[in-house]
Amino acid sequence: MVKGKSSSSSRWLQRQFKDPLVKQSKLDDYRARSAYKLIEIDNKYNFLKRKSAIVDLGACPGAWSQVASQRIGTSQLSNDELVTWNHGMVLAVDKEVMRGLPGVFVIDRADITSSETLKRIYSFLSQRKVDAVISDMAPNATGMHKLDHERIMELANTAFQVAQNCLKTNGTFLCKIFQGSLLNGFKHELKTSFESVQEIRCQSTRKESTEMYLLAQQYKED
């Protein structure tokens, strides 16, 4: 068992070492290569607009929050300027401890599947609505595709529930998923709440991965 884990870790380290985006992320001062996925998506769909309010679920280590704060214009602001939301807002949520980022509010050590975490999010928002909920959440991989698919769809459903509770009319929801049997049902559910739902496979996604993103736009608030 230990040998298997060691072998898997070794392969991961080799892949990281060879990955040009891992190297580029260090040069660009992003905390992870996943930053380029959000950049790619937003370059095409342009939903991270200046002065927007964004909730980033599963944010740690913070790459998506970095991109979001840069694009909406909060990354250079002081704490006093951030409090008002007049210049935009990014809220990063994760169950891990997350180092702070300029222009980003953080709720960490917060499991998104816990009702207590949801209370903390809604308390922070204080009934204010946001322009986008983005989620790069994924479960710890087991190597069993069906189980990994089911687990990530549970996370996607939880993220969708957050979106339903705090999105403005015409807001945007973006979440990571793995291809599998539950995908079509989830897309159908999203289509009841959004005018547009699209599947996106990023160019920076590793070719062996079943990872995709669902981008749901123009939220139809009840």
Image: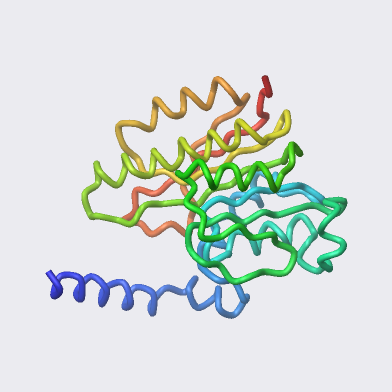
Q: Residue at x 55, y 58 (%)?
A: 59
Q: In this view, does 107 lie to the left or right of 13?
A: right
Residue toward you, 154 or 146: 154
In percent of width and height, residue 188 lies at 46, 23
When the figure is inspected, residue 136 is found, relative to residue 147, above or below; the finding is below
When the figure is inspected, residue 189 is found, relative to residue 7, above or below; the finding is above
**Placement of the N terminus among the 4 image quadrants:** bottom left
When the figure is inspected, residue 124 is found, relative to residue 82, above or below; the finding is above
In percent of width and height, residue 33 lies at 51, 67
Q: Which residue is drawn at 55% across and 73% down?
A: 25
Specify the color scheme: rainbow
Q: Quadrant of residue 81?
A: bottom right
Q: How many labels does the image show?
A: 0
In percent of width and height, residue 195 lies at 63, 24
Q: Is residue 19 left or right of residue 75?
A: left
**Placement of the C terminus among the 4 image quadrants:** top right
Residue toward you, 178 or 168: 168
Q: Is residue 84 left or right of residue 114?
A: right
Q: In which quarter of the image is residue 140?
A: bottom left
Q: Which residue is drawn at 33% across and 77% down?
A: 13
In percent of width and height, residue 109 lies at 51, 60
